[in-house]
Amino acid sequence: MNHAYVLTLSCPDRPGIVHAVSGFLLERGGNIEEAAQYNDHGTGLFFMRVQFACGQLTRDDLDTQLKLFAEPFRMVWQLHATAQPMRTVILVSKEGHCLNDLLFRWKSGLLPLDIRAIISNHRDFYQLAASYNVPFHQIPVTAATKAHGEARQLEIIEAEGAELVVLARYMQILSDDLCRKLAGRAINIHHSFLPSFKGARPYHQAHDRGVKLVGATAHYVTAELDEGPIIEQDVARADHGKTVEDLTAMGRDTESQVLARAVKWHSEHRVLLNGHKTVIFK
């Protein structure tokens, strides 16, 4: 039986937190395998991630005792069993590079996910989903059907027990209500030209302006469009010889890699929210 866990926590900073957490686990037969912490002097908050093994207590006992332990520290904490891959639902539209990359990495054992469903407002990738034996749900979205469509999306997400929702180039703006319901568990990816080149054909706009960097940003979804806490970013250099097609290909590669890293870190419980920012224990 696997008794490996990840404990993540944040609380007001004070002396002795690391000692207290280590002592708590030691007293219960826990063996720490990986630990990292961060003190944010700007906010006065302390963040910690501990990966440990503990075979003496059940998961329920650990939860109960952690609740009592955390209270005096005013800790916000979560305990995760590492043997359980993260239940995930992916949303996609008509650009499949990020979806294809995530599915390949998942099947290759590179992402600790349990991909339960793919939802799309188009039918383009139903065969791709079938090739990975993942249920595919087409939910068309128009201005008139948006509310009904989002209700159906949320129904699938909740029915699958999804801990993570990935917007893998899903080209629909989520309502404020759905953003709130998915807070902290939905990741989006977009090109990093924003806010300079909004709307359609961003790579054409970038090419016309002679950009020298093509990049991507992965962030948590919030009601503020494309302004959620950033998880990962990356860039690739371009020069005057690059065509629109070159820039587009570079952008898609970068988007796929950035999203995959963000999803991996989230699924390994390495990302902690710090207000409008994130703390990432890589």
Image (cartoon, grey):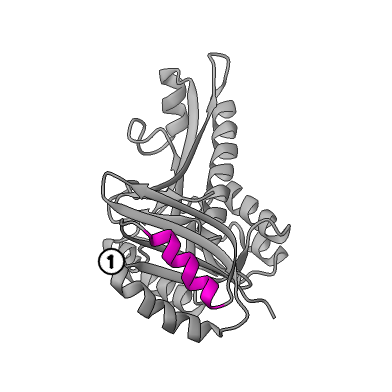
- Up the image or down, 137 lies above or below 17; here it is below
Q: Is residue 75 visible?
A: yes
From the top left corner, tell me how far across and down residue 103 is, in percent: 65, 57
Which residues lie in the magenta part? 16-28
Question: In the displayed structure, does residue 40 sit left or right of residue 93?
Answer: left
- Which residue is the site of mark 1? 177
Q: How many marks?
A: 1
- The foreground one among 5 and 89 is 5
Question: In the displayed structure, does residue 27 sit left or right of residue 274?
Answer: right
From the top left corner, tell me how far across and down residue 69 is, in percent: 38, 75
The residue that appears at 42% across and 66% down in the rendered structure is 20
The residue that appears at 57% across and 55% down in the rendered structure is 264
Magenta-colored stretch includes residue 191 = no
- The foreground one among 1 and 99 is 1
- The foreground one among 117 and 232 is 232
The amino acid type, in three-letter code, at marker 1 is Asp
